[in-house]
Image (tube, helix red, strand yellow):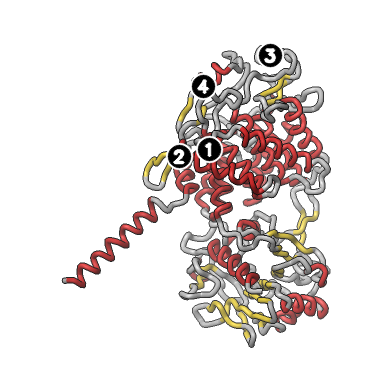
Amino acid sequence: MKRKSLVFSFIALFGAFQGNAQTKVKPLSDQMATTAMEVWKERSRKWSYDDGVVQDGMTEIWRRTGNAAYFKYVQGKMDLFISADGVIDTYSQEHFNIDNVKNGTVLLDLYKVTGQQKYFKAATTLWEQLQKQPRTKEGGFWHKQIYPNQMWLDGLYMGQPFYAEYAALIGNKAAFDDIANQFIYMEKNARDAKTGLLYHAWDESRAERWSDPKTGLSPHIWARAMGWYGMALVDALDNFPKDHPKRKELINILNRLAAGIKSVQNNKTGVWYDILDRPNDKGNYFESSASAMFVYAIAKGVRMQYLPASYFAVADKGYKGMQQEFVEQRAPGMINLKGTVTVSGLGGKPYRDGSFAYYMSEKVITNDAKGVGAFLKAINEMELAAMPKPGLGKTVVLDSYFNNETKKDQNGQEVSWHYKWDEMSNGGFSMWAEQFSNAGFKTSTLYAAPSASNLKNASVYIIVDPDTEKETPKPNFIMANDVKNITDWVKAGGVLVLMGNDTGNVEFEHFNQLAKNFGIQFNLDSKGRVVKNQFEMGKVTVAAGNEIFKTAKDLYIKEYSSLKLLPPAQAVLKDKEGDQVMAVARLGKGTVFAIGDPWLYNEYVDGRKLPAEYENFKAGQDLVYWIAKQLMKK
């Protein structure tokens, strides 16, 4: 009787634990994303930037978590507007509404991931709008055709991140002067020198009733407008050339903006008022979308090292405050975001005069797309910041000398491709690159031979699928001097990752000369061959207690070469036939990891193709943490 009661107690306890895991441990990002997918299931009435903010947030969470439900949601929503030949339904270029350009970032993500031309064609339509967009005398984009001579802070987010990403994609270097100038003009014309805050809008002509006759400025500092501007800066910088002379000025602008944001953060709650220059006026309220935007811009600015690390405290206080002030449980595993103003604008019909009374008259609701989208981005940054950072100060170098395949891009230019960090398509390593970055590593690419000087600052060196003459007319084979340099580097403490392929798809003769130094040989075979979508044919199960894979159990590895091992190499994973799939060798102070397949490329990591039971995304993260652990042993 006593034994039975103990068993029943354990079962009850375990059931309670599972319930807690489902309702309490579920990340906030997942809870907010689940709500978004329920609230905005149907197609919107028209092409709208609101949708794009949510979709950008969902895409960022997908890349961090590998949960393809988010990507599929984004693609499905966008496909409701984009025809097979790339026409955007309900969009009109003639309106020259810069709000309509915002969703171009979503289109470019979809194009880079899927390669479907319809997304690039639609994005090109938005690019063409920017080329024709009316401008102020000094060159700033008008907000809309119906708002002549006006620059609004909102417009920077609607246009510049897309402008920068498209320019980077097509190699239009001249565009970055114009992109930088948009931010510079806006700050110059809208910044209050005393507070460092930016007014909502500026009318060059001073013709609008809301504009100050001397300065052209709107009457008040609207928090969400400043939030749009801050998000625009950190997102546009993602694609801004690191050697561009105006990049530093954009970072300086961000620092001035962050100082202003910090100065008006409410000390008690950690969040921000809707109208920042009138915090004590009756009716003013804490506003969630602006608070989310400030948290996002500052947290990302710190992560990207645009802002001093001390600013993270501002983001952290704001994030905690948001959870207290604006977040409520919608259902188990789902949350609502309260306190978002639906809209605030200037001019138009009926006329909006920009007065404090006007801003207070606009409706505040729960689960507005602008607020939810910004909060998704903020949550993602804060959850990313909470991840372990064992790779801080370490650089992971990916070879692009021995694996140097090229192809023509959408502009007919030759570009390096196949297992590259920034490649978001099926054959790229962009998801794995983000896993390294999220663990604190810096990623870089080596386009030259691995000389001692080229490997000097590398903590990790990855060689993937060296080229055959079939793949590259004049491949760079791994020669004796390369073998010596790499071996010496490993002995000194480097972590070497060797990823082969199945026979016929990789240059084994020279690759094996390198691997031999570590007791590893790639067999000239092709295991794990999979017929169509019979994924179980590529299943490899990780045994309990594996030294590398602490969270991943069922892996998908297809068409790989097995390994033959001699000391010091040891198997760390075998297939169901008992053949070695992965191996580790330790030599001197360093470590070598080997597998006969590129394996962690996007197609089998990003969740879009594989059934959910296969945990390659988790395996990639496990491998990153294991690599970091080897470096700590030095």
Which residue is depicted at the point 62% across and 21% down?
220
- Please identify the quarter of the rendering in which residue 190 is found: top right
| Mark nearer the N terminus (2 vs 1) | 1
Q: On the image, numbered disc 1 is attached to which residue? A: 270
| Mark nearer the N terminus (4 vs 2) | 2
Q: On the image, numbered disc 4 is attached to which residue? A: 362
Give the residue type at disc 4. Glu
- Badge 3 marks a residue whose secondary structure is loop
Give the residue type at disc 3. Glu
Q: On the image, numbered disc 2 is attached to which residue? A: 324
- Badge 1 marks a residue whose secondary structure is loop
Give the residue type at disc 1. Gly
- Please identify the quarter of the rendering in which residue 494 is found: bottom right
Nearer the camera: disc 3 or disc 2: 2
Q: Quadrant of the N terminus?
A: bottom left
- Badge 2 marks a residue whose secondary structure is helix
Between residues 369 and 381, which one lies in front from this camera angle? 381
Between residues 527 and 284, which one lies in front from this camera angle? 284
Q: On the image, numbered disc 3 is attached to which residue? A: 208
